[in-house]
Amino acid sequence: MPVIHDIPLSLKSKGVLRREGLGGRAKVRPEIKSLIEELLASVESNRLLGPAAAYEYYPVTGMSGVQISLECDRAVMGLAIPSLFPEAKEIAVLIGTIGPNLEKQATAYFNRHEPLRGLLLDGIGNAAVDSLTQEVCKFIAAESLSRGYQVSSPINPGMPGLPITEQRQMLKLVPAEEIGVSLTSSGVMVPRKSTSMVIGIGPKMTRWTQASICVHCSLGETCPYRIPV
């Protein structure tokens, strides 16, 4: 079960602002932008990011309306997977994290009564997870292409058609403990700045944009991170 470290991440103020709900046409004060740049520099100088991912490929042995069956009597439940990956020959199950250090620093800011720094650093962490997702998807795509396959866009537990409860099963399918990721009894990932996803792999796979995902999300226009079509 492979593990990858030292994943290059691209962090820009624009991505951080979007994750703070300040994207689009929102007017942002210059001092906020300046503070974000300062925090981005501190993230690098203090090595607050430790991006890593654990993944595994599983051949698909069957599909029903509610699950995709895998080798070794394993399965991932969810209405979305059979409908989105109808021609998948394999799936890649992946867990990624940026590590605990950024989260610890954000908590320290809150404890020192510096909530703005804490909130902005938390937004940087969310943007880092976004970048991590993009990079690991590129990695899986490149490996799959070398075998003559295409990849789908990723789907994450909690999205329509893939229950958040499947996250516990997914952590059993990859060596999440090797990158320091676990679940609490209530199903929350630790470190919090972590992500899990399933990617379909096969000769013909459908991809979709983040905007198209937002169209079907139950949060609709109320979501501050929504990307318009």
Image: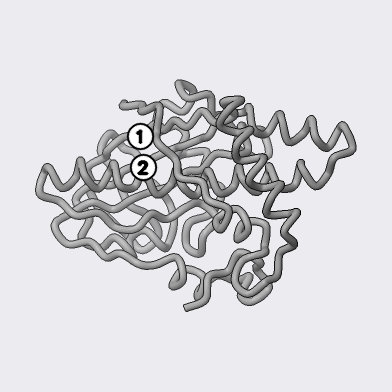
Q: Nearer the viewer, residue 10 or 183?
A: 10
| Residue, far top | 178
| Residue, far left | 148
**Residue at image location 67% in from the left, 64% down from the top:** 22
Q: Which residue is mark 1?
A: 55
Mark 1 or mark 2: name the one nearer the start of the chain. Answer: 1
Q: Which residue is mark 2?
A: 136
Nearest-to-viewer mark from 1 and 2: 2
Crowding at dot 1, Cα within 10 Å, few <14 / some 14-19 / many 20+, comes out as many
Q: Nearer the viewer, residue 202 or 96?
A: 96
Left/right placement of residue 142 relative to residue 125 reads left
Left/right placement of residue 180 relative to residue 138 reads right
Which SS class for mark 2? helix
Give the image's coloring scheme: one colour
Which SS class for mark 1? strand
**Residue at image location 31% in from the left, 37% down from the top:** 73
Q: Amino acid at mark 2?
A: Val
Q: Amino acid at mark 1?
A: Tyr
